[in-house]
Amino acid sequence: MRPRTQDGYDAIVVGSGAGGGMTAYVLACSGLRVLMLEAGRHYDPVAETPMFNLPRDAPLRGGGTRHKPFGFYDATVDGGWEVPGEPYSSAEGTDFRWWRARMLGGRTNHWGRISLRMGEYDFRPYSRDGLGFDWPLSYDDLAPWYDKTEALIGVYGSNEGLENTPNSSPGVLLPPPAPRAEELLTRHHCGDLGIPVIPAHLAILTRRLDAARIARTLWPGNALAQRVTEESMAARAACFYATPCGRGCSIKANFQTPTVLLPPALATGNLDIITDAMVREVTIDARGQATGVHYIDRNTRLDEYAGARVVVLAASACESARILLNSKSSLHPDGLGNGSGLVGKYIMDTVGAGVGGQIPALENMPPHNADGASAMHLYMPWWLYQQQANGQLDFARGYHIEFGGGRRMPGFGFMGGLAELTGGSYGQRLKDECRRYYGSFLWFDGRGEMIPNEDSFCEIDPEGVDRWGIPTLRFNWKWSSHELNQARHMQHTFADIIQAMGGRVTSDVHDDGARAIAAPGVIIHEVGGAMMGDDPRTSVLNQFCQSWEVDNLFVTDGGCFVSNADKNPTLSILALAWRASDYIVEQLRTRSL
């Protein structure tokens, strides 16, 4: 995976996650010579995923630690909210948590695979309520790339025709798995509360893909792209519900770039990958055009250089902002492409809050097979759009609800919940209570939209550098009353659902939204920092993720986001990156770049 040469590339792609993986795949399939630079180590999910290991096979029974917060089996290596030798800081009054995954595939190895399309309202938030900004493109502009992305990666779900919850084109989605017992019970009681509960959309194969048909549909007239795409798809198996997707997937049933996007891109012969490459800056020539990047080889600690006709940053929203801000020159004294002063500004994370409960109706369940996809089979999309439009709520944007529990693999959390109910027990009584209560706990999480604000941004820390000598980031953050009120509403809604099910709430429910809301960065959905727009004075990129000031520089990760809808961002990152990549190909074909 080392390049034969570092000269003659059409494009350099920095980052191998959702945006970088999709960009490299599309450009390589289109015949461009591409060099990918990944800050972390090589990672092979086929060889490294512990598919059948049990909690008892791991240290601390697989429990989380400071350096493995999601547990021993989480696929993230050399990463997390803390990365040795790669510090960041927070300004006074801020406690931002920045998750990084230093590995090939980035966060696509870790994410929950929840794949929700942004809707028509989500691209025009300012027009609806006068807050934040409108996107420079509409849902209809992006819809064809949503279809192509879902068909390529494999997303299960259904078309329900609900408000601002877009349908996919016929035949695109895979069939969703059957709901579990606790999901059916939740849906029944949510019906009385007027809360819709529908099949979730997850990037997990519930059946094998129709590889030949999909490859021809995605790449008409491109024999090379058809061949490598079909071969890659044919190597993916349907999920057989073995272990959580967060471990990685050796049968390639879920979506992560090292198994879905990078193999076909490499098979074209047009992609080279260098891992352990910490990019520190983008270089420009006297005309102001990007010429390549400087990076530090993490093994040799030498400063290396690679050049190309086009530079694409897809290192994750804040990392790409860091690279741009560190790329200073006489032409760009405040950072590359930062004439508007908006690089690093208006960063957003998802609003998060949760509540747990114990449901007596689920006690003493007979042993049954509760296998399924590693995450939810059902979820609740936001349902109060009209109430918001009529001013009946004290927050402007909505949230969706993710929930789970039931008879999954029990862990230490189950024993803690048991102790609360029984006051402690041992011997035969403990065994009887385990059988009684196992499967009766549920947890509800809200994932809501944050409105961008001027007080939430990242900047270069004037006193910080990482172990490679690269200046680090300092974060500033402020929630508005909209986010705080939304988090409070989440918790009270979840308590209402639990009580409607005849259950008891087992966690705190706050009237103070500041106590209900998760810390910024904890949901790991940060976007923004290089927002797109219609005007170079008020944005960093145009609608094709292209820098206004450096026309051969693109940002195809979450940095381009204008708003952060309640829909998890990965599917939109993938679709936007494909659309931008098609634009790059066309611009190079017509010699406009």
Image (spheres, rainbow, N blue to C red):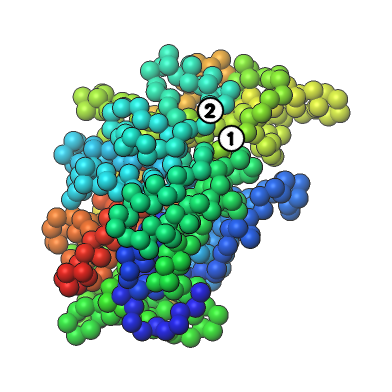
Q: Is residue 237 left or right of residue 21?
A: right
Q: Nearer the viewer, residue 211 or 464?
A: 211
Q: Are marks 1 and 2 in contact (CB under 8 Å)?
A: yes
Q: Amino acid at mark 2?
A: Ala
Residue 474 in sight from this viewpoint: no
Assign the C terminus to one quadrant of the image: bottom left
Give the mark nearer the N terminus: 1 vs 2.
Answer: 2
Q: Nearer the viewer, residue 167 or 550?
A: 167
Category of crowding for the residue at label 1, using alpha-carbon neighbours closer than 10 angstroms: few (below 14), some (14–19), many (at least 20): many
Residue 171 found in image quarter: top left
| Residue displayed at 57% across by 19% down | 503
Name the spot of residue 346 as percent of width and height, x first: 28, 54
Residue 583 found in image quarter: bottom left
| Residue displayed at 66% across by 50% down | 51
| Residue displayed at 14% across by 55% down | 534
Name the spot of residue 387 as percent of width and height, x first: 26, 24
Residue holding disc 2: 178
Please, what secondary structure does the residue beneath circle 1 have? loop
Category of crowding for the residue at label 2, using alpha-carbon neighbours closer than 10 angstroms: few (below 14), some (14–19), many (at least 20): few
Q: Is the residue 125 above or below the residue 463 in the image?
A: above
Q: Nearer the viewer, residue 316 or 373?
A: 373
| Residue displayed at 54% across by 19% down | 185
Residue 359 found in image quarter: top right
Q: Is the residue 206 above or below the residue 580 in the image?
A: above
Q: Is the residue 87 above or below the residue 516 in the image?
A: below
Residue holding disc 1: 372
Name the spot of residue 368 as percent of width and height, x first: 68, 25
Q: Amino acid at mark 1?
A: Gly
Please, what secondary structure does the residue beneath circle 2 have? loop
Q: CA distance from mark 1 to mark 2?
A: 8 Å
Q: Is the residue 406 above or below the residue 593 in the image?
A: above
